[in-house]
Image (cartoon, rainbow, N blue to C red):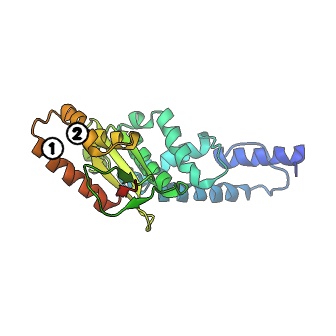
Amino acid sequence: MKLSEDTARIQDILGDYCRTGEGEQIPGIIPGRVNHYRRLVYNVIRSNMDRAFPITLAALGEEEWDQLVQEFFSKGLPQTPQIWKLPYEFYNYHLMKETGIRIQKPYLEDLLYFEWIEIEVHTMPDKPFPEYLSSGNIFMDRLALNPEFEMIRLNYPVHMHPAAAAADMKGDYFVLIFRVPDTGNVKFLNLSGIHTYILARLMEEDLPLKDLKGDIAQTAGIESIKYLDDALEKFIGDLIDKRLILGYLKE
């Protein structure tokens, strides 16, 4: 049912007050009590951000973290009606405002992004799994990959080191975040450049590993076939153990 113009206007006034603490007198609300609405709404937002970004909260400390949440609360103008999506809007707000540079925490955007992607992978809709066999040949058979993942690039290794230490380690870092079948737990893998290349090729092309070995060797500058085979067998075996690779596609 469509709201009357007066009701919609009152909702807008109340919403603006809850965000900023400023605004005109709100009809129907006793002066002095409206502060409770703002406090309750902020507590919901703050609690949601605390749960979404526990590592960032620990890295910044209570006071600085509260300032970031307060700024988003009063100026961010969230668009989503779904509270579980608010952490993305929080991340995007501070990304656009370059908050990390402003507060001299250059790792901030990476840390918020990493924690948000963990949420996104955990809550992503179920994807269809390929039919696969548990036994096969790593090189000759096509591999069945877990489709529930995200691969991201970071400038700071916030997934491996405390934030303060990561701030001095700017570079290119690749992380694969995936959901474990059956348990639904979210895990992540730090990837080297060549491992990122191998996984990207496997994900993009419907080919067995043997057909990619030449390109992999050239990209990595590897001349020894035995060394390459041993390295690939170890890498793929580790991904099978972690359930990022499920097995071998049925032909």
Q: Dot 1: what SS?
A: helix
Q: Quadrant of residue 215?
A: top left
Residue beneath disc 2: 213
State the residue position of label 1: 228
**Is 9 on the left or on the right of 84, as rendered?**
right
**Residue name at image x 47 percent, y 36 percent:** 95
Q: Quadrant of residue 38?
A: bottom right
> Residue 74: image x %, image y %?
61, 43
Q: Give the x, y percent position of residue 13.
A: 77, 45
**Left/right of residue 109 with respect to residue 87 in the rendered view:** left
Inter-mark Cα distance, 1 to 2: 8 Å
Assess disc 1: are there few (<14), some (14-19) or many (≥20) residues with their C-alpha within 10 Å of its C-alpha. Answer: some
Cβ atoms under marks 1 and 2 closer than 8 Å: yes
| Left or right of 143, for residue 31 | right
Name the outermost residue toward the bottom: 183
Q: Residue 227 at x, y = what percent?
A: 11, 45
**For the image shown, how many numbered marks are present on the structure?**
2
